[in-house]
Image (cartoon, rainbow, N blue to C red):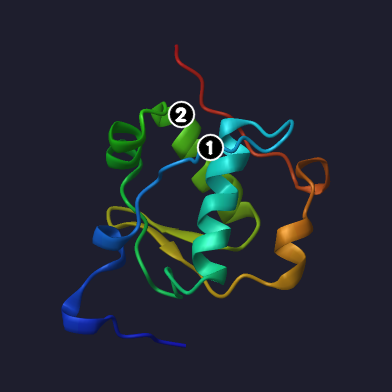
Amino acid sequence: MSHEHPAGVSAVGRFRVVLSSDRRSGWSLQERVEQLVRDAIADGVLVEGDQLPPYRVAAATSGLSIHTILNAYRALIVDGVVRSVPGDGYFIAGPVRYRDFFTASDDRPSVPSVTAG
């Protein structure tokens, strides 16, 4: 499934990691970033093959830590929502399936966390 963006607009330029002030009860910042990406896919803002902002850029523009963004991207990879292309970045792997909206973090395989060291 391929989707052309009008006038050559890239997803990287259209999608930003911006968390609303509406905090989801009990959700970590990482989980909120994950859901933001899922919502962007469900809303058609991001489609299969679109590139996510580089994690350093997403961290700088959102005010979140690099570790929070990177851990969110890694969790989305584990869930099959995002794929990583070494040297190129993170890309939407495909459409979000209905069940992806209800995957509890406890049900996911563990993802190694990045910690400052």
For the residue labelled by badge 1, is the local secondary structure a helix, a strand or a loop? helix
Could you classify mark 1 by the number of other residues whose Cα lies within 10 Å: few (under 14), some (14-19), or many (20 or more)?
many
Instruction: Provide residue 103's location: percent of width, then percent of height.
Output: 77, 54
Residue 9 vertical position relative to residue 38 in the rendered view, above or below: below
Drawn side of residue 24 relative to residue 19, left or right = right
Q: Position of residue 104 (x, y in %)?
A: 79, 47
| Residue under pointer 1 | 71
Q: Which residue is mark 2?
A: 67
In the image, 10 versus 74, the foreground residue is 10
Left or right: 97, with 36 as reference point: right
The residue lying toward the viewer, choosing from 8 and 70, is 8
101 relative position to 40: left or right:
right
Q: Amino acid at mark 2?
A: His
Q: Which residue ends up furthest to the top in the rendered image?
A: 117
Instruction: Measure the C-alpha gap from mark 1 to mark 2.
Output: 6 Å
The picture places residue 32, in percent across and down from the top left corner, at 58, 41
The circle on residue 100 is none
Report the front residue among 4 and 91.
4
- At horizontal 62% and vertical 70% (from top left) the residue drawn is 96
Amino acid under label 1?
Asn
Residue at 35% x, 41% y is 55
Q: Secondary structure at mark 2?
A: helix
Q: Answer whether labels 1 and 2 touch (C-beta < 8 Å).
A: yes
